[in-house]
Amino acid sequence: MYIKTKRIGRVALIQLHRPEALNALSTALLEELLEHMEPLDADPEVGCFVITGSDRAFAAGADIKEMQEKSFLDMFHENYFVGWERFTRLRTPKIAAVAGYALGGGCELAMMCDMLFAAESAKFGQPEIRIGVIPAIGGSQRLTSLIGKAKAMDMILTGRMIEAIEALQMGLASRVFANDTLLEETLQVAETIASYSKPAVMMAKEVVDKSLEVSLKEGIAYERRAFHALFATPDQKEGMQAFIEKRTPHFVGFRQAVIA
């Protein structure tokens, strides 16, 4: 068993648990991760994911032993790593809570999340160049998008590691917390997100992601239509009425649709 899960209210806590390999991302770990997360993603009672590892390592990379003997034809036929695209298609917000090493595939997994919170002990890197390869789970693309070409080139071509504060300054990490409060602080943020209207949260995540794929003009038009669409939801009526009445809104999200 490589994945541990725990429900905390409307938050799903997902822990990578392969301690003997510093949570190296094997095919079996990915399959188990998706087996847990895909049903939770579809659950209207789950409003946010928190993904974490151990104090020593979030994930120290992909599983080198698993792929070392493969040929080009093996990798091409299997379309190796394509399964991670299923992780990126999860629509419920995902927060990475990173302590210790997040290297190679581990750094890429953290970047696939919607927010990245780091403990002071966190260390990030794309060291694939040191073993004769390059990032392959989106590292070259997401890292460049997050921190810019100059800094991405620095990390990818040298293979150097950066610490949490530098990751925060670069824009790779959203927040940095003390080692012993990382999970508690992350869960508090996740609980806040999960308390909001799930349709609105999913729309917000979608429009931000869209900004990376289209022009400014197209992105603004997409955002505006998504905003209009939310006026078809009960939560828009409830949220605005609660604001007018100066009370806390009671959002139903997708629960009404499921019951109906």
Image (cartoon, rainbow, N blue to C red):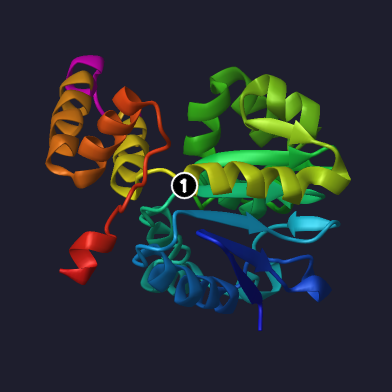
Residue 8 vertical position relative to residue 194 in the rendered view, above or below:
below
Q: Which residue is drawn at 17% across and 22% down?
A: 218
User: x, y percentage for residue 20?
Assistant: 82, 75
Circle 1 crowding by C-alpha within 10 Å: few under 14, some 14–19, many from 20: many
Picture quarter with the N terminus: bottom right
In the image, residue 215 lies in the stretch drawn in magenta: yes
The answer to whether 251 appears left or right of 161 in the picture is left
Residue 126 vertical position relative to residue 13 in the rendered view, above or below:
above
Q: Which segment did they paint magenta?
A: 212-219
- Observer able to see residue 19: yes
User: x, y percentage for residue 136?
Assistant: 52, 52
> Residue reaching furthest bottom?
1
Residue 13 vertical position relative to residue 4 in the rendered view, above or below:
above
Q: What residue type is labelled 1?
A: Ser
Q: On the image, numbered disc 1 is attached to which residue?
A: 195
User: x, y percentage for residue 144?
Assistant: 52, 29
User: x, y percentage for residue 48?
Assistant: 49, 53
The answer to whether 8 appears left or right of 112 in the picture is right
The answer to whether 156 appears left or right of 77 in the picture is right
Q: Which residue is drawn at 53% across and 71% down?
A: 33
In the image, residue 221 lies in the stretch drawn in magenta: no
- Count the numbered circles shown: 1
> Residue reaching furthest front?
245
- Pick whichever, 118 or 138, lies toward us: 118
- Where disc 1 sits, the SS reads loop
- Observer able to see residue 130: no
Residue 120 image-quadrant placement:
top right
